[in-house]
Amino acid sequence: MGKIAFVRMSHRDYISDVSISKGNEAADTLKKTNIDIICNSEPIVDPVEARDYGYKICSENVDAVIIFFETWVEPSVVMAFLLEVKHLPVALWGIPMFEHNGKLESTGSFVGLTAFSGSLKRLRIKHEYIYGLPGEDKTLIDIRNFLNASSTIKRLRATRLGLVGYSAMSIYPGTFDHLLLRGIIGPEVIQLDTYSLINIADKAEKSQYIEFLEKVKKKAKISNDLTDEILEKEGRLYFAINQLVKKHNLDSINIKCQYELSQEYGCIPCPALSLIAEEGIVAGCEGDILTTVSQVILKYLSNQTITYGDILDVKNGEALFSSCGFAPYSLAQDSEKVEIRDINTPGFSGPISSMILKKGKITYMRVNEDQDGFVMNFGTGEGLDTELRQGRFPALKFKINGNEKDFIKSLYCQHYAICYGDYIAELTGLCNFMNIKFNLID
């Protein structure tokens, strides 16, 4: 989850045994949750001291800052520190009144937080709030959500995403401004050509491309409708994709499948990409970089293997989610029913990963580009019992948490990334700090 600076601040006239104990409790709470923290042992009370501590924090490569209002704090003290670290996500932590020796006690913490928060609002400096006593479940959840979003922001700036080809089939929402994506969201896109992929694939030796079949047989059944020739081609693509990942030090890769691979090469890379996703590289296809970026974000937030697909139908408050053939194998509802089979669709050639995705709470999300920058769409749903789409394609039907019409109106594209669990709080915080508009369906 990265590293944070936990900064205790106070006013010398308000320091007491009670306030110091609350600061110690807060620091201990973070340490016990295995969060890597840098913490000052004594509260900062002086603007010059605060500024110098800001210099120190900037040299520590932290992901985020939590300012803990141990007591009332003069805004000038906090501001001296904050102006040195405002490029980082910042959360203000204040504590409510609490019972002490049979009566309600206050250190002035919340008053200090509200006074300084007003200053940040006036300056339009983004910040989050943590309000609660150390050790309370809600407090810990808020802290973890803040740190998860902050760590994701930092990791996005270090992400290298390979794009083989470009957006397929004139899917306009899959196109993007390279510079805006790099400058606002973070990932660097490394543009690669389909020829490079096929050139590596064609030169692969048997020992290299047979590795795919050996690995995938441990995760899926191989259908009798697949020839040895097509399985060899899929293995070659798997080897070539891995070579590009290693050569360019990629964290993620997207392959344009239509029409160069599906028709000219005669083999789509769906099972190969599904296996690569299982091995830790975020994978996607059809050249839709914005969906792949969405997958990367969900991976960083959830530490899960992430899939994507099309929203194919919306009916009775339920949406049908399905891809053409990409589906990481560990996401199957029944691992015994995962199959590699022929796509058997006009205009496509090659194998697909055929499986029903598992049920449960999901978060769906997509980053979209518009004329003013980026907009993120997200919401939650409940995965339901589902059948294979058209008898063979990966699928998940989910109940939309929110209004069906609002969901439909919010769609920028058919492609969405999904993960399991509820990550709305983290996504909202991430949008706040990255200054990205968002549509939340709830």
Image (cartoon, rainbow, N blue to C red):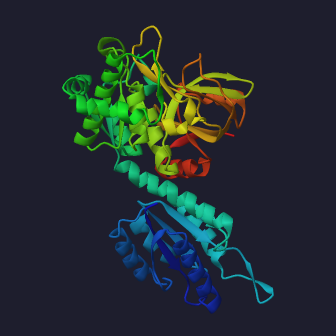
Q: Residue at x 60, y 51 (%)?
A: 425
Asked if one can make out residue 393 in the rendered structure from this viewpoint, the answer is yes
Asked if one can make out residue 375 in the rendered structure from this viewpoint, the answer is no
Residue 162, given in percent of the width and then of the height, sits at: 31, 36
**Residue 3 sits in quarter:** bottom left
Task: Please give left or right for residue 358 compared with residue 163 in the image.
Answer: right
Q: Nearer the viewer, residue 250 or 77?
A: 250
Residue 310, given in percent of the width and then of the height, sits at: 54, 25
**Residue 115 sits in quarter:** bottom right
Task: Please give left or right for residue 114 compared with residue 237 in the image.
Answer: right
**Residue 4 sits in quarter:** bottom left
The outermost residue toward the top is 346
Q: Residue at x 42, y 28 (%)?
A: 271
Residue 44, given in percent of the width and then of the height, sits at: 48, 82
Q: Nearer the viewer, residue 161 or 244?
A: 244
Q: Nearer the viewer, residue 437 or 63?
A: 63
Q: Is residue 400 above or below residue 134?
A: above
Q: Is residue 19 above or below residue 207?
A: below
Q: Is residue 90 above or below residue 360?
A: below
Query: Which quadrant does the C terminus fall into?
Result: top right
Task: Please give left or right for residue 71 compared with residue 55 in the image.
Answer: right
